[in-house]
Amino acid sequence: MKSIAGIAVHKAGSVVFQKLLSHFSKEAGLAVDPLSRHFTVSPLPQAEILRKLEIDIKPEGVFYGVVRSPHFSAMSRLKELRLIAQVRDPRDCLTSHYFSLAYSHSLPKNPLKRDVFLARREAAAAKGIDEFAIETAPLFEHRFQQMAILLEKHQGMQVLKYENMVERSNEWREEVAEFFGLKMTRKLAENLDNVADFNVEREDISKHKRQVKPGDHLRKLRPETIHYLNSRFSNILEIFGYSKRLE
């Protein structure tokens, strides 16, 4: 089977996405060699790490894990792989990113990186979620634009939605199984159940899995902020099939 790489926008459940895809890959007989595992052990920027790693990419028989944008843009050999991607409503991405940065994301072990992170955390908390969302919107706009360009250029790229992963899991799994040329067996379903649990009894801003219900921007952002984001992300929302509703 042709080798596969996963791609996800930031805050679209990329960690769970990779774990689930790894199970599908093993079921399909692919070796699992996540490129992202090198990120924590190398001092180099992630884009440079990927450029070095892609020299050894094999066109057959390997699942290379999930890379979060914008780093996939550094890889020239993506055209040699089958791609499966995951997106999420960019407005919910911004909301999730705020709570992660301001409250729940674990501190880096490196002292210098920790100091930089703490400064960013303090700044995010001081701004509040609406100001943060407006200021950070260009970052996510750029990442989604890159995903849209890749979708246009890469024939056969499969795009999945975070919202389906957490709310319509069976439908989401069937899409992935078809991509891998598999049938959903009871054993595979049980293995996937052990990997991903999307039940959250109550929201807790101190936890990484704070809440999973789609549409959180409608509950957290002011109407004028949502209007701004709807306008800014208008083309992106249309491309990836998200509504501009305000309630």
Image: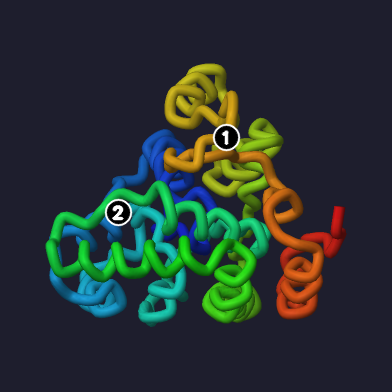
Please name the amino acid that badge 1 sits on: Glu
Where disc 2 sits, the SS reads loop
To which residue does mark 2 refer? 34
Q: In this view, does 220 lie to the left or right of 121?
A: right
Q: Where is residue 30 in the image (x, y as percent from the top left)?
A: 35, 45
Which quadrant would residue 140 be assigned to in this image? bottom right
Q: How crowded is mark 1: few (under 14 residues within 10 Å), some or many (20 or more)?
A: few
Residue 145 lies, with reference to residue 126, above or below; the image says below
Q: Which of 134 and 154 is in front in this view?
A: 134
Which quadrant would residue 55 be assigned to in this image? bottom left
Q: Residue at x 43, y 39 (%)?
A: 207
Q: Position of residue 220 (x, y in %)?
A: 68, 53
Residue 73 lies, with reference to residue 238, above or below; the image says below
Q: Is residue 234 left or right of residue 24?
A: right
Q: In this view, does 25 lie to the left or right of 85?
A: left
Q: Residue at x 41, y 56 (%)?
A: 66
Residue 109 lies, with reference to residue 171, above or below; the image says below
| Residue 154 shows up from this direction | no
Q: Residue at x 75, y 53 (%)?
A: 218
Spatial CA span between label 2 and label 1:
31 Å
Q: Residue 203 carries which label?
A: 1
Q: Where is residue 16 in the image (x, y as percent from the top left)?
A: 45, 42
Which of the marked residues, 2 or 1, is nearer the chain's N terminus? 2
Q: Residues within 10 Å of mark 2 (few under 14, many from 20)?
A: some
Where disc 1 sits, the SS reads loop
Which quadrant would residue 46 be assigned to in this image? bottom left
Q: Which residue is drawn at 51% across and 36% down?
A: 204
Q: Is residue 239 left or right of residue 137?
A: right
Please name the amino acid that badge 2 sits on: Pro
Q: Nearer the viewer, residue 76 or 42?
A: 42
Q: Position of residue 76 (x, y in %)?
A: 38, 82
